């Protein structure tokens, strides 16, 4: 019996089981994402916008947009720098302080008022402005080991590492701190490892509990009624919000969200793998609103993995850097992210060198590094374990500009009945200017189950929009 059937190569990924258990779900999607219409799209690339130090070693550990001053602030090797940008030009260095002023060893966090920008990374809080070079807050009542700093209702607020206390500056005078300007999260005796301001409420993240406080206009801060959440935080820099809820990695190694009323576990296709990571404490998150998508990018440095949630489609992927020598994926190069609203630009700080790069779909590589879009299906059987012959596989693939001549390719391989992978087969996607191509494969053999892998790494933006296969059921 001959028939034409849709090929499930655009289904969500699932990593919670061995891939042999998957039929319709996909097992891998690297360096891409599913669009709202179901097509597979290669992730945006990047190009160096400002190079502080091109040598490998230290990366950019923090990026921050100081909106009041229209400045892009970055941290490199515990030094603080400011970039200025206008009229579509690349950022220009305007403040080069050149001395490591931050003394902590954690990721920097930022806050600002009208006059100053504040930075903390596990040591004393540092502040600076156009007219004031970075210096430590001199008031002895300010915390000495702040990992997180935030701004709320004219107060600068910070934790003190290893304690359940948070400290706040004098109201409207953020360089002055009082010996009585602190409060304690006392629901459980666990230390505050992170703090986060959301909807003008202060979230205090402990290792085993979370408390929500507000400015009560008197003390000045108190815990809101019902503001105690029985969930801890295992990764202090995994906390982010999307305007509707707060997200983090909890003490049980689960991704969770809290909308102000309910705590909800986010079941993910990577739960089993995250449970197996040796540590989660180094995980950090970046919220990247890009085009019509909102990406939550979770970096796991020690696990060498980058997991990505597309909040608009609630689907997960992996992004990475393809190492052409080891032929393996490394973590994605993004180590910090900021959207520079005044210029309409997306910037990342690279993890491997002192480079601030612009993120854009117009770039089809990461400064020459391949973006290797790869999708691997489950073991497709089309609803029957009978033998089937593949007469033709057809895929609709749109390619864009990106190669200055020549043809782009799609590499396809497959394995039948969970045995050996075939030799890769290259399919032309057409020359420059050909933007709508039907890729075709003929007579690829007989199978009961088949797993496909599709790879594109020729430096062109690629969108998969459909696939079907002509099969003949034999017996």
Image (tube, rainbow, N blue to C red):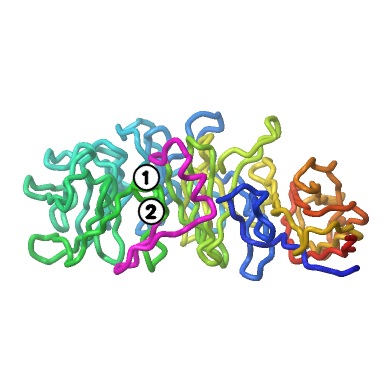
Q: Residues within 10 Å of mark 1 (few under 14, many from 20)?
A: many
- Using the numbered discs, state the Cα–Cα distance from disc 1 to disc 2 in whole angstroms: 8 Å
Q: Residue at (28%, 37%) from the top-left corner?
A: 122
For the C terminus, the image quarter is: bottom right
Asked if residue 35 can be seen in this view, the reply is yes
Asked if residue 168 can be seen in this view, the reply is no
Q: Quadrant of residue 212?
A: bottom left
Q: Is residue 35 above or below residue 309?
A: below
Residue nearest the observer in this picture, 115 or 64: 64
Residue nearest the observer in this picture, 451 or 307: 451
Q: Which residues are magenta?
A: 256-282
Q: Is residue 41 above or below residue 6?
A: above
User: In this image, 185 relative to 290: left or right?
Assistant: left
For the N terminus, the image quarter is: bottom right
Q: Is residue 100 above or below residue 33?
A: above
**Residue 429, how many percent across, how many down?**
84, 56
Disc on res. 380: none
**Residue 417, how many percent across, how many down?**
78, 48
Residue nearest the observer in this picture, 125 or 421: 421
Callout 1: SS: loop
Q: Residue at (53%, 35%) from the top-left corner?
A: 352
Question: Where does label 2 land, which residue?
Answer: 248
Residue 454 belongs to the span the image colors magenta: no
Residue nearest the observer in this picture, 23 or 240: 23
Q: Are marks 1 and 2 in contact (CB under 8 Å)?
A: yes
Disc on res. 235: 1
Q: Residue at (27%, 41%) from the top-left corner?
A: 126
**Residue 451, how many percent across, how many down?**
75, 51
Which residue is outermost to the front? 475
Callout 2: SS: strand
């Amino acid at each position: 019996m001959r028939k034409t059937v849709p090929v499930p190569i655009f289904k969500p990924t699932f990593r919670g089981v061995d891939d042999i258990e998957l039929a319709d779900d996909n097992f891998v999607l690297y360096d891409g994402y599913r669009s709202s219409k179901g097509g597979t799209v290669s992730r945006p690339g990047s190009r160096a916008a400002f190079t502080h130090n091109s040598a490998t070693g230290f990366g950019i550990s923090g990026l921050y947009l100081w909106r009041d001053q229209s400045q892009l602030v970055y941290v490199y090797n515990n030094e603080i720098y400011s970039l200025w940008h206008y009229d579509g030009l690349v950022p220009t260095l305007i403040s080069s302080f050149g001395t490591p002023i931050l003394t902590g060893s954690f990721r920097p966090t930022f806050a600002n008022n009208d006059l100053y920008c504040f930075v903390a990374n596990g040591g004393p809080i540092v502040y600076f402005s156009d007219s004031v070079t970075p210096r430590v807050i001199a008031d002895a009542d300010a915390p000495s080991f702040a990992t997180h700093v935030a701004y709320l209702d004219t107060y600068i607020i910070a934790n003190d590492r290893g304690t359940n206390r948070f400290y706040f500056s004098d109201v409207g005078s953020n360089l002055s701190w009082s010996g009585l300007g602190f409060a304690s999260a006392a629901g459980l005796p666990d230390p505050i490892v992170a703090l986060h301001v959301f909807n003008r409420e202060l979230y205090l993240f402990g290792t085993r509990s979370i408390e929500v406080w507000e400015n009560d206009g008197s003390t000045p801060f108190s815990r809101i009624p019902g503001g105690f959440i029985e969930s801890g935080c295992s990764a202090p820099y995994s906390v982010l919000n999307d305007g509707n809820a707060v997200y983090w990695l909890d003490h049980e190694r689960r991704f969770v969200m809290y909308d102000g009323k309910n705590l909800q576990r986010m079941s993910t296709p990577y739960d089993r793998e995250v449970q197996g990571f040796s540590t989660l404490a180094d995980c950090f998150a970046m919220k990247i609103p890009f085009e019509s998508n909102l990406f939550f990018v979770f970096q796991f440095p020690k696990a060498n993995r980058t997991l990505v949630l597309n909040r608009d489609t609630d689907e997960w992927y992996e992004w990475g850097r393809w190492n052409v020598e080891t032929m393996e994926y490394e973590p994605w190069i993004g180590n910090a992210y900021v959207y520079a609203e005044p210029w309409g630009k997306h910037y990342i700080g690279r993890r491997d060198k002192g480079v601030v790069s612009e993120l854009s779909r117009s770039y089809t590589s990461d400064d020459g590094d391949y973006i290797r879009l790869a999708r691997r299906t489950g073991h497709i059987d089309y609803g029957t374990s009978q033998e089937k012959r593949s007469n033709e596989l057809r895929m609709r693939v749109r390619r864009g500009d990106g190669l200055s001549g020549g043809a782009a390719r799609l590499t396809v391989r497959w394995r039948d009945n969970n045995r050996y992978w075939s030799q890769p087969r290259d399919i032309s996607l057409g020359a420059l200017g050909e933007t709508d191509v039907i890729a075709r494969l003929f007579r690829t053999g007989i199978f009961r189950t088949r797993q496909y892998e599709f790879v594109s790494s020729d430096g062109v933006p690629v969108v998969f929009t459909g696939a079907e296969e002509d099969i003949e059921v034999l017996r």
